[in-house]
Structure formats: structure tokens, C-alpha cells
Image (tube, helix red, strand yellow):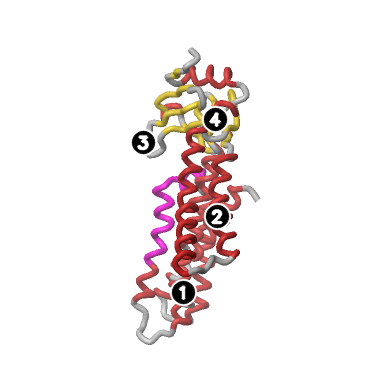
């Protein structure tokens, strides 16, 4: 099933859970038959919306739309909070309003799938001029390894202090979990490669398209290729120069779009 089909199904499920509790809350009568009726109505509304929307992913894949999808079901918390006194916990969980609150999950998934559809379209629209896979720069890897070793060093110091103070040693399971956890943080820093594509439309970094306007410039140091981002919270992207196979093609492409400097020039 394609992502668009997943998105349609999520919209139907979301609207079914969102609309379902309205009927038993608004109409006196048997709770669960009314809830089922509301869910059917909601599913029908969701199906019509998904079928009629010209571009569902574009409508729901933005941050504001995703926030609305997640926030709206929270309104059902009020009927739960103001439920009749003495309602037992089981009845509380099985209240139709609880199903409305549960719509937060399909709402979040709807936003996530829609956003991924938009990202995929952006990636497919890029005409790749040059691509490569590279690890972070040696400087960045050394920094990541150093940071990863800090909790391991602190833990080992605690082990030694406990041993000297109580004359007891940690069991093998504790040591294994500590070492494996530290290694799982260190190894990706040493071997993790990122896929990069340069095209006329921008840079595709790990599947995310970034416009050339979002970069301030690029430089080639002795160890790394560095892309400077405009956004302060994203900072610079560094790639190990030794991992770039066709360096000439990469640098010539960068020279077309960014202010580029190199110690070799």
C-alpha cells in the first residue's frame, strides 16, 4: 500500500474516532450504539474529505496542520474530567470520550505520513548532479567519541568507588549493559555514513531536501568538506574528505551555487 493510501486510511480512522463520541455526548440514548453510529458518520466524512482533497499530503503535512490534528482531540478530556462522580475506572476508560482522546495517535500518524509524502516528492523532484556517502569529519567523530565516553568513564568511576567503599563488585549483567550501551553510542560515530545529493533544486541530505538558499557557503579543509547552514540551530554539516570519491565533481557543483573556498586553490 502506497503512502497516499495509508494517509487516506489514517484520515478515515481519525475522523471516525473524532466524530464518534459526539453523538452519545449530544443525544440521549444507548451509549455504544450511538457511538458506533457516530464512528460510521465520521468515517464517511473522512472518506469524502480524503477523496475530494486535491492534495491531502500538502494540506496535512505542514507543522500547523499537524498541531491542529493532535490538539483537537484533547478537547475530549473535558467530558472525562467532568464525568459523573463515582464512575469506576473501567467505565472511565471505556467512555466514548476516551476514544476521542485516542484520536491523538492517528492524528499524529496522519501528520507524520503526510509530511513524509511531501519529503518524498521533494526528493524525487531533485535532478541529481552528483552524489556521495561520507562519514562525519574526523574532528566531529573525535568529539562524538569523547562525549560518548563521558558516561562510561563516570560509570566506571562509580563502580570503582563502590568497590572500594563496600568491597563488592558489580555483577556481570550490569557491566555488560554499561559497556554495550557505551559502544552503541560510539560505533555509529565511527562508521555512520550520510547520503548526500547535489542538484539544481538543492541538497538532499539523508532524504531531506534543503534549498541552496538555506546555505551560507562551503569550504574544503584538509580533512573535511564543510557546508555552512544559514539556520543557527542546524549549524554546519561536515563530511570526511577521504570518503568523497569524485571530489572534483562535488567541488565544481558547489562552486555553481555557493561561495566556496579551498586550501588547495
190 vs 82, nearest the viewer: 190
Report the residue marked by disc 3. Answer: 232
Q: Reading the chain from its start, which is encountered first: label 1 or label 2? A: 1
Disc 2, SS:
helix
Report the residue marked by disc 2. Answer: 181
Q: Nearer the viewer, mark 2 or mark 4?
A: 2
Q: Reading the chain from its start, which is encountered first: label 4 or label 1? A: 1
The residue shown at (46%, 49%) is: 150
Q: Are marks 1 and 3 in contact (CB under 8 Å)?
A: no
Relative to residue 75, is residue 5 drawn left or right? Answer: right
- Figure check: 3 above or below 15: above
The residue shown at (35%, 75%) is: 81
For the record, the magenta segment spans 54-75
Report the residue marked by disc 1. Answer: 96
Res 153 seen here: yes
Task: Give the Cα distance between marks 1 and 3.
Answer: 45 Å
Disc 4, SS:
strand
Report the residue marked by disc 4. Answer: 240
Q: Reading the chain from its start, which is encountered first: label 3 or label 4? A: 3
The residue furthest right is: 1
Q: Nearer the viewer, mark 1 or mark 3?
A: 3
- Figure check: 143 above or below 159: above
Amino acid at each position: 500500500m502506497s503512502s497516499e493510501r495509508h494517509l487516506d486510511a489514517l484520515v478515515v480512522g481519525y475522523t471516525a474516532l473524532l466524530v464518534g463520541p459526539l453523538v452519545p455526548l449530544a443525544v440521549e440514548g444507548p451509549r455504544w450504539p450511538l457511538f458506533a453510529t457516530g464512528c460510521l458518520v465520521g468515517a464517511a466524512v473522512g472518506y469524502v474529505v480524503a477523496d475530494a482533497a486535491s492534495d491531502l499530503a500538502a494540506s496535512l503535512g505542514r507543522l500547523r496542520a499537524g498541531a491542529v490534528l493532535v490538539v483537537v482531540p484533547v478537547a475530549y478530556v473535558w467530558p472525562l474530567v467532568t464525568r459523573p462522580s463515582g464512575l469506576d475506572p473501567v467505565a472511565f476508560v471505556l467512555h466514548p470520550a476516551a476514544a476521542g482522546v485516542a484520536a491523538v495517535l492517528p492524528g499524529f500518524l496522519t501528520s507524520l505520513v503526510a509530511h513524509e509524502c511531501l519529503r518524498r516528492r521533494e526528493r524525487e523532484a531533485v535532478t541529481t548532479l552528483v552524489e556521495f556517502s561520507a562519514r562525519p569529519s574526523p574532528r566531529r567523530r573525535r568529539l562524538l567519541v569523547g562525549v560518548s565516553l563521558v558516561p562510561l568513564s563516570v560509570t566506571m568511576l562509580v563502580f570503582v568507588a563502590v568497590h572500594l567503599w563496600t568491597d563488592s563488585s558489580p555483577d556481570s549483567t550490569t557491566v555488560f549493559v554499561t559497556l554495550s550501551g557505551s559502544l552503541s553510542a560510539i560505533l555509529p560515530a565511527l562508521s555512520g555514513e550520510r547520503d548526500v545529493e547535489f542538484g539544481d533544486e538543492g541538497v538532499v541530505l539523508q532524504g531531506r531536501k534543503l534549498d541552496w538558499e538555506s546555505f551560507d557557503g562551503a569550504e574544503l579543509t584538509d580533512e573535511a568538506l564543510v557546508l555552512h547552514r544559514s539556520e543557527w540551530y542546524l549549524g554546519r554539516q561536515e563530511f570526511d574528505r577521504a570518503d568523497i570519491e569524485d571530489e572534483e565533481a562535488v567541488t565544481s557543483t558547489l562552486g555553481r551555487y555557493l561561495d566556496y573556498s579551498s586550501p588547495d586553490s
